[in-house]
Amino acid sequence: MKFKNNISPLVILLSLSFMLSCVDLDVEYKNKPDTEKALSDPFTVYNISKSTFFNWYMANTSSLSPRMGMWVAADNGTCSWANSAMLDMSLEPREAFNNFSSYTYAGTLEQYWEDTYSNLSQANDVLTVTGNGLEIGKLEDVNGEKVGEDTKMVRAMSYFIQGLSLGYLGLTYDKAYIMLEDTDSETATPSPYSEVIQAALVSLEKSIDICEANQFTIPSDWINGSEYTNDEFAQLAHSFMARFMIQSARNVTENEQINWDDVLSHAEKGIERNLELYMDGTTWKNWFFHYTVRPGWAKIDLRIINLMDNTYPSHYPEDGIAPDPKALSTDTRLESDFNYNESINMKPERGYYHYSNYEYSRYDYEYIAGVITGDLVDFYVNENELMKAEALMHLGRKSEAVEIINNSTRTTRGGLQNVSAMFPDDMLYDAIFYERDIELIMTGFGIAFFDMRRRDMLQEGTPLHLPIPGAQLMTMSQDIYTFGGVEVADGINSSDGGWF
């Protein structure tokens, strides 16, 4: 196995072939120069670092990723259309994931893998050249400006992207390559997800260390629409650390083994404002959001509606006749966040269990030339607060957890009654996950899937993680493997649980 910039040549070739054959490609990446340029030009290195957050965001919101398939596999959304493997990953009963490169939607697995490693490679390049002494100034430098004043900033960003890239590889796949700036690519071998997640946490800690030792402000065009001071950027890294620690669990047993003291520590140092990005519809685009809120395309799964009104069916009737009457709830978000649409244009032969009359309507956005524009949130402060509450529950500090729950969106947006420390633990956990289900539907790559996974609630036979893509396995001359299917449900690689 040979790599250039940490990427397998065959995977690059396959990826380029896929990209050239895709008429509707929604992935756009900026500034991918070769290593020689990165080694020689400070401005190029600055621009590489500037582009890495954009590249990460575009990969994580692309339709050429497993994200939409994971969304429907978690029964947060529902869709009978086949694109992005949504149909195949939401079949009932669940079937094994097709990991052969000949599979029509192989790009949902292969493209995300390649895009993530490509961006990781850029971050590693920046860390290599700045670690070897390259100093970086501002692009608008004039005579007299201090050379190298942005070096610490680009290194903080590069470790941050290194951490995010490894983190999402560890969350998504059963194993992955831990490629760092000093990794020998000739001898690299895949590591299990737990080690990949641990490496991600170390990288994020390095970013935090730089932030805490230096002062800088990340410009608003790096994280579109918002400047970040070094202190705010450290908070963001802490929140992602807490998110990765929580989401990495593959089942209830692993969830109980999480170091909840560490989760609480990072969440307490976490974000104080939402990670919100402006979609301009030209460069910054969220294709996951585009397809999942698109009228007549995807819907909100009735599992979610049933949470808000437990008299409403959690599955669409097998005769295809819509439930009557519409759902009702004391939670005001049923009206503010969800729209009832009598029209359903999905194919009945693919299963009425895909049907739903509810669409997501919370956000204020508009379509310009067919593309969504407006501010979209990837990480809510509320998610960070709910992580605190969950950690406190695991640590036996119920009263503090209850205070957070009662000051959360449960009451501020939902208008629901307060919970009490006198409630049984399972009711309080349910209140936390209810908020996560209702509030975080469209935010953060795979949140619903990872939450259902760690609670043993994914439908039986759902893959608990995805395999290394078949194209990569072919490159390494290894057998193609996969996960999923009720016949292999073991609770380790494929869910042996379920929510109904």
Image (cartoon, grey):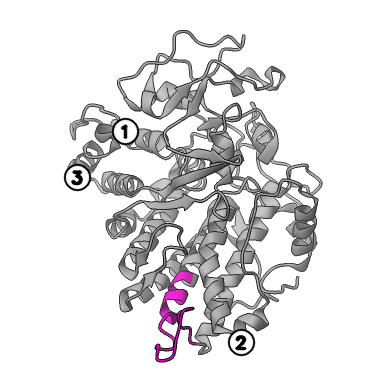
- Find residue 431 and name its label: 1
Identified by mark 3, the residue type is Glu
Disc 1, SS:
helix
CB under 8 Å between discs 2 and 3? no
Please state the extent of the stretch shown in magenta in the rendering: 135-157
Which is in the foreground here, disc 2 or disc 1? 2
In the image, what residue occupies the spot 40% across and 83% down? Answer: 149
In the image, what residue occupies the spot 42% across and 63% down? Answer: 220
CB under 8 Å between discs 2 and 1? no
In the image, what residue occupies the spot 76% across and 48% down? Answer: 22
Identified by mark 1, the residue type is Ala
| Up/down of 145 relative to 470, above or below | below
Count neighbours of disc 3 (C-alpha within 10 A) and say few if under 14, some if 14 to 19, many if 20 or more.
some
CA distance for labels 2 and 3: 53 Å
- In the rendered image, residue 150 lying in the magenta stretch gets the answer yes
| 456 or 146: nearer the viewer | 146
x and y percent of residue 139 in the render?
49, 78
